[in-house]
Amino acid sequence: MSLTATATESDRETELKTVPGPILLLGAPGSGKGTQAKELVKLWGIPQISTGDLLRSNVSQGTELGKTAKEIMQRGELVPDTLVNEMVAVRLKQPDTAAGYMLDGFPRTLPQAAWLDGRLASQPQCLPVVAVSIHVDYNQLLRRITGRRNCPVCQTIYNIYSKPPKVSGFCDVEGAALVQRADDTEQVFAERMRAYEAQTAPVVEHYRASGRFAEVDGDRPIAEIAAGIVSAVERLRKQA
């Protein structure tokens, strides 16, 4: 076995021994947040907790919380923070969250962040939330989104800037004409970015002020970004 291979295995063992605790992974549309969440969930063996999934699960299972949420949504109203918080509280009691979990879409507001901090602080065995944001330059994000094209037959995804097909406009495999999703336009992207920044900024500042926020460069290979997030979490855990 080579020294390089040994070092790589040693590094991986170190990563796997890290107790991640609760992690809020942030990233603008096109930043690769979803891809990284999947990588880190596998690496640490922790669940990804999505408030959207929790809401759908509670409604489909007909829980008391789900019934209340369904009634609210049928009236065309937004599900309040208090109800979302209760769903999260129930989920965090599950044994698979003991070593940590990846938060997706929560906390989305300052009141939610304050509620979660208070809940975790009241339980001595729980680590506090640390937040890591994947940063990618606006223009690069724009190219990632507006450059996307997919094959309607085999669903292969291309990018006219970074991963173009061999023949412009046509799938390498099926030869079918590639299509662009209706929401992969510059106008829609700009609106999504404004909404993301307005919504995320207060939450970011909340964790930054408490010394529990880090930013990693998202314009790198997937494995390097994942390693950067792991390093950031380790650093934040030492500070928290």
Image (cartoon, rainbow, N blue to C red):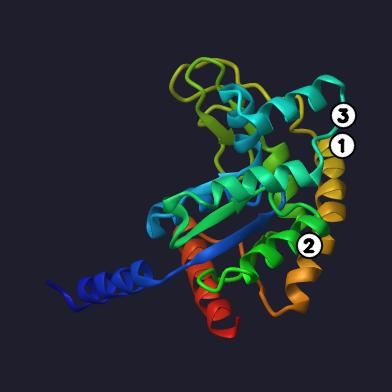
Label 1, label 3: how far apart the Cα atoms are: 27 Å
* Position in image of residue 128 (x %, y %): 61, 70
Name the amino acid, label 1.
Gln
Up the image or down, 87 lies above or below 125; here it is above
Write down the quadrant of residue 9 in the picture: bottom left
Q: Depth check: give the residue in front, 57 or 137.
A: 57
Residue for badge 2? 203
Pick whichever of labels 3 and 2 is earlier in the sequence: 3
Q: Residue at x 81, y 27 (%)?
A: 72
* Position in image of residue 96 (x %, y %): 42, 51
Q: Are marks 1 and 2 in contact (CB under 8 Å)?
A: no
* Position in image of residue 34 (x %, y %): 57, 46
Q: Residue at x 68, y 55 (%)?
A: 27
Residue for badge 1? 187
Write down the quadrant of residue 211 in the picture: bottom right
Judge left or right: residue 129 versus residue 203. Answer: left
Up the image or down, 166 lies above or below 10; here it is above
Q: Depth check: give the residue in front, 162 or 32.
A: 32
SS state under label 1 = helix
Quadrant occupied by the C terminus: bottom right
SS state under label 3 = loop
Residue reaching furthest to the left: 1
SS state under label 2 = helix
Quadrant occupied by the N terminus: bottom left
Name the amino acid, label 3.
Glu
Q: Residue at x 55, y 46 (%)?
A: 91
